[in-house]
Image (cartoon, rainbow, N blue to C red):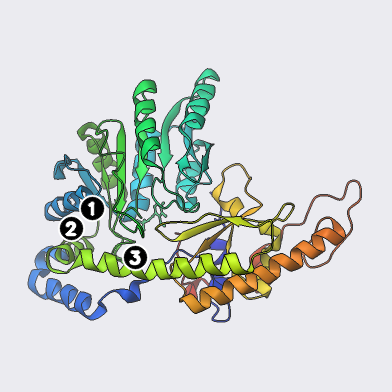
Amino acid sequence: MKTSEIRALFSVVSRPEVVSLAGGMPAVTALPLDAVGSMIGELVSGMGAQTLQYGSGQGDPRLRERICDVMALEGITDASPSEVVVTVGSQQALDLVTRVFIDPGDVVLAEGPSYVGALGVFQSSEARVRHVAMDDDGLIPEAVEEALLESRAAGDRVKFLYTVPNFHNPAGVTLSEPRRQALIELANRYDLLIIEDNPYGLLGFEHEPLRALRARDNQRVIYLGSFSKTFSPGLRVGWVLAPLAVREKLVLATEAQVLCPPSLTQYAVARYLDTQPWREQIKTFTELYRERRDATLESLAALMPAGTTWTRPDGGFYVWLKLPHGLDAKLMQPRAVNAHVAYVPGIGFYADGSGREYMRLSYCYPEPDRIREGVRRLARVIEAELDLHTTFDTVDTGTFRAVGPGTRTPQVPDVESYVGPANRDTFKDDRA
Ligand SMILES: Cc1ncc(COP(=O)(O)O)c(C=O)c1O
């Protein structure tokens, strides 16, 4: 196990002078906090015997019913509450699925780049991650097929394909309709299991949600969902939808891990879905995120130097930016922090050490004006980096040196050593 690129930024992003485009924290202040507060208070005073008690390992039956209603919004109409396991965020769902399927040395196919929290889980189970190329339409099915056949020919056991089809973290792209169909056909042809991780699916800006992969195949797709982005990440409520045989193992695994998911937060989510206008709240969130996405894309277009490219998300939280040729986002990071702007270097989203020329920008948390200021600072840092690059061919940490034979290994600075020790108590970012 190792520290993720995002954890390494903990101490930096909580400083008020730094514009953080790093963390993926949902804008929970857009929730009706008083209404949610009284709802939770009433739950405890009215139903304390249940809400403060242990519950079922599989999760509260009422909540599992409501989860099926939520999934119907993405075309999953055949799900039964008995196939749902409630988890401590979809992060625990990822961990459970990995425990059930992975033995050390097994191969997991995953987009390149991929969600950092999933990579951490796969690595801690000693799975080998093989990245598969994606483009503006998401994962490329032909590349999946090639990776699968090559791995199998090499004698590797490919246990599953892990994919985030909607508003990808970190790439910001969405799997197109034809590719969804192609992936399902491929899964059937090659008997491949798909883990569909979908925390952002209802946060689209331009169109109704696309039909989930699970809506097209109820045997080969295991679906992971979350209330972290549509309601609150602090409640830590997510879920897995899996065929019954798998569901049984998942319940055993979760009982071994946490006995049962927290009762109070499960009741809170179920009550929220029963009594509050949650669909309107999702609209409020998407309006707010759309405005922040627009601020990001407009400022990038106005300010970024030639040679910089980026994705254009139509939902979710993230833009994936590629630096001009030769620049390294990890090496540049201390200079960006010095200029009071933070991002996550792309290297954190690959299991194989690639991605140095990329960075993830999150627009979910800062207000639009702060985003504009952050992009302005970032553009200046990139321009300065380009100047240095042209002058010296490569750049080092703070001191510059010309490159001669044998001197090409750059010193990668540790952000903590640059900004001072992390203060874990004041950490405000998330792992998103
Ligand atoms: C793709 C993806 N999967 C899973 C998670 C975990 O979410 P949670 O555990 O809060 O449900 C995140 C969080 O950012 C994510 O982006």
Label 1 SS: loop
Q: Nearer the viewer, residue 135 or 5?
A: 135
Would residue 259 appear left or right of 316 to someone viewing this image? left
**Residue 232 placement (x, y as % from top left):** 31, 66
**Residue 201 placement (x, y as % from top left):** 33, 52
Q: CA distance from mark 3 to mark 2?
A: 35 Å
Please report the residue visible at 17 percent of the width from the left and 78 percent of the height from the top.
Answer: 38
**Residue 160 placement (x, y as % from top left):** 41, 33
Q: CA distance from mark 2 to mark 1?
A: 7 Å
Q: Nearer the viewer, residue 97 or 408?
A: 408
Answer with mark 2 or mark 1, whichever residue precedes in sequence. 2
Res 54 label: 2
Assess whether mark 1 and mark 2 are in contact (beta carbons under 8 angstroms): yes
Disc nearest the viewer among 3 and 1:
3
Please report the residue visible at 35 percent of the width from the left and 57 percent of the height from the top.
Answer: 204
Res 260 label: 1
Task: Find the residue positioned furthest to the left.
Answer: 46
Identity, as a three-letter code, of the amino acid under mark 1: Cys
Disc nearest the viewer among 3 and 2:
3
Q: Nearer the viewer, residue 251 or 398?
A: 398
Label 2 SS: loop
